[in-house]
Image (tube, grey):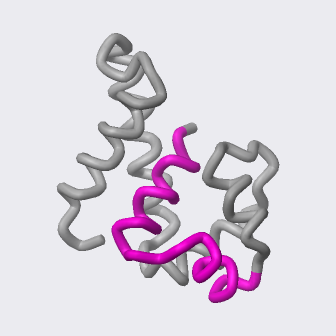
């Protein structure tokens, strides 16, 4: 799941640093960095706290990550590289005006 890229993109769109997000969510900056790089052992309560600070429902964050995976499954050549995935996620999140 592209959850880490999605969270990082939303955080940046909200103009928050990892440090600020960490402080406001009650986690360390290292935890935020691990999550953004794809930590597979993230706990639901961690995601809930982060989504609250980001002011984006966790269900929306999961939906964006799922949509990215759908595109990746259907048109893999579009998102072949990490840079392409990152660019796609950034464009997709930017298109969601409510975030």
**Residue 7 location (% of width, % of height):** 51, 58
Q: Quadrant of residue 37?
A: top right
**Residue 3 location (% of width, % of height):** 55, 48
The region drawn magenta spans 2-26
Depicted 80 relative to depicted 44: above or below: above
Quadrant where the N terminus sits is top right
Q: At x 33% / y 11%, what residue is drawn?
A: 77
Q: At x 73% / y 53%, what residue is drawn?
A: 34
Depicted 4 relative to depicted 96: above or below: above
For residue 41: magenta?
no
For residue 17: magenta?
yes
**Residue 36 location (% of width, % of height):** 61, 53
Report the front residue among 71 and 19: 19
Depicted 92 relative to depicted 71: above or below: below
Total of numbered circles in the picture?
0
Report the front residue among 60 and 19: 19
**Residue 74 location (% of width, % of height):** 33, 17
Q: At x 39% / y 23%, what residue is drawn?
A: 72
């Amino acid at each position: 799941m592209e959850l880490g890229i999605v969270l990082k993109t939303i955080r940046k769109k909200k103009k928050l640093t990892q440090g600020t997000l960490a402080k406001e969510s009650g986690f360390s900056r290292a935890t935020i960095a691990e999550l953004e790089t794809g930590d597979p052992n993230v706990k639901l309560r961690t995601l809930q706290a982060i989504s609250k600070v980001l002011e984006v429902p966790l269900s929306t964050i999961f939906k964006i990550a799922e949509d990215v995976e759908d595109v990746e499954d259907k048109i893999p050549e579009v998102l072949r590289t990490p840079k392409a995935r990152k660019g796609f996620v950034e464009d997709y999140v930017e298109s969601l005006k409510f975030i």
